[in-house]
Image: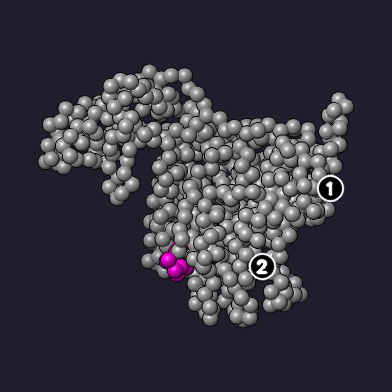
Amino acid sequence: MNKYEILKKHFGHDDFREGQAEIIDNILMGNDVLGIMPTGAGKSVCYQVPALMLDGITLVISPLISLMQDQVASLVESGISAAFINSSMTATQYYKTMERARNSEYKMIYVAPERLSADDFIALSECVKISQVTVDEAHCVSQWGQDFRPSYLKISEFMEKLSYRPVLSAFTATATKEVRDDISLILRQKDPFMITTGFDRKNIHFAVERPKSKKDALLRILRKNTGKSGIVYCSTRKNVEDVCDMLYEKGFEVTRYHAGLSDLERAENQEDFIYDRKTVMIATNAFGMGINKSNVSFVIHYNMPKNLESYYQEAGRAGRDGEPAECTLLYSGQDVKLNQFLIEKGNETNEDFTEEMKNAVREKDMERLKFMTFYCTTNECLREYILKYFGEKPPSFCGNCSNCGANFETVDVTIEAQKIVSCVYRIAQRKRSFGRVMIADILHGSKNKKILSQGFDTISTYGIMADTPTYRICTIIDYLIEKNFLTSSDDEYSVVCLTALSADILKGKQKVSMKLPKELRVSKSEEKKKSVIDYADVDSNLFAELKALRNKLAMEAHVPAYIVFADAALRDMCRKMPKNKQEFLNVSGVGEAKAEKYAKEFTALIKSFSERFVQL
């Protein structure tokens, strides 16, 4: 079978998402891969599909037991032979799994990095063929990453011990360029195919609030999301306990998770949340990595995280099913001091670091904290701020964050656009071209030595926007490039040039309006128009019945409800109303194994619902 047939057969999808097909093709060609894909973008499919096509076993290095269990349960439900090997197993389970692995009965085995140095595991890797080694949460390998785990350094040591070289694929959701380069270097990848599919999660609404009372703000948000599944992140164990007790007294279905609890209680509380017995999890950042719960509708940060990498990863645990979701951060100045304390304390107690490493990591952590604080205090588009941090060039208005909803307005910038285009034209007349910052400096009337020495203080557009801040000019230039009124080259210097549409602005044939932060106002604002994500409506009664059936079947199978079907699949059933197994296979997220197992009961319910509706 080819990759599309496997995608449909086991995962129930007709097409790949952005970047998935390219990654799969490279793995199948024997190339190492480094994929940077946001949470919910389908990283697992990128290594699971080739795992089923390659001759041998795919070894998946995973940092957490819960992550392994979740992934394996999902694979088995989809008709794929998979197993995990970790410390949660009894001796009997371990030896039986190892024996089946030696007999090549699995296509995928999930292991913790610590397991790689065990003699019996090294022996196993020599008696079976490992076709692919996949490193999940690959940022853990870099000391510059937000979640460095020294055990991940064992991966390259394991690869060196093998008498052969499997394909090495690595994936993470959040990594700056520095961390990406570090991952590939430390894992010793060979000329890897690198791809960043984009960090944007369009279905998530980002918000920052600065409430007088965080508890009152939290209660308001939770009451608005009554019945929905969500996570509340706190910076300390004490905050987790205090918030959990407060919400329990108010009657909310909550549970808690932090490193101070026993292993048994953490496991029970996590299970309560995953199985929807408790709708809200109150937790430190110890919770959530690799949790594939698809119906999390909101994430609330009760305290500001230490860095944007952690924040965006935690925020990404909402809306994994593609449905609209919210991520709200409740900020106060005390959060900064608390995080400074946690950074200092964390580095002091890390026995795996030398003093030099501690100092270097502390300095990097403080720099990250600075960017996180800027995010909480900016009046500009929150999504733009995040995406710029990760190296993307997004529009300055997303329409789906609290700042865009409150601090932006539509502004007529036609006159400003004419001045900018005229400046680019005057520069081109002198057979020169510059980047956006240099152009902004000329328009603003900067005394920059480069401008003065080359005589650009003598052109007619020099200083004609002296009353306009350069960052505002740059924002408008970016918008003109986005709308093709100007163009920017893709080379190292990224110079700005005219396009065929530039003349329309100069001649007054083209009006230009754009969204700008209110403090960047350059003209009288128009009526604000809020951007809305378009999602098809479904019958809420049918959805409720399908959800009840799914939950019943999940309880019988002793698996989380989303392992049976994600909410998105149930909504697609509502839209397509399948009446038989063949039609059921057309539902997004329904593969052959799930159709064989569930088509009869779900189509019978849909048929019954239709008949009842007609009678009404």
- Looking at the rendered structure, which numbered label has been put on residue 600? 1
Residue located at (62% from left, 54% from top):
4
437 vs 521, nearest the viewer: 437
- Looking at the rendered structure, which numbered label has been put on residue 589? none
**Does residue 72 appear left or right of residue 171 in this picture?**
right
Q: Position of residue 607 (x, y in %)?
A: 84, 38
* Quarter of the C terminus within the rendering: top right
Element type where label 2 sits in the image: loop
Residue located at (18% from left, 30% from top):
462
Residue located at (71% from left, 33% from top):
538
Choose top left, top right, bottom left or bottom right for residue 182: bottom left
Earlier residue among tags 2 and 1: 2
- Residue 525 vertical position relative to residue 7 in the rendered view, above or below: above
- Residue 92 visible in the shown view: yes
Q: Residues within 10 Å of mark 2 (few under 14, many from 20)?
A: many
Magenta residues (range): 183-191
Q: Position of residue 426 (x, y in %)?
A: 19, 32
Amino acid type, residue under disc 1 in the picture: Lys
Q: Which residue is mark 2?
A: 107
Choose top left, top right, bottom left or bottom right for residue 120: bottom right
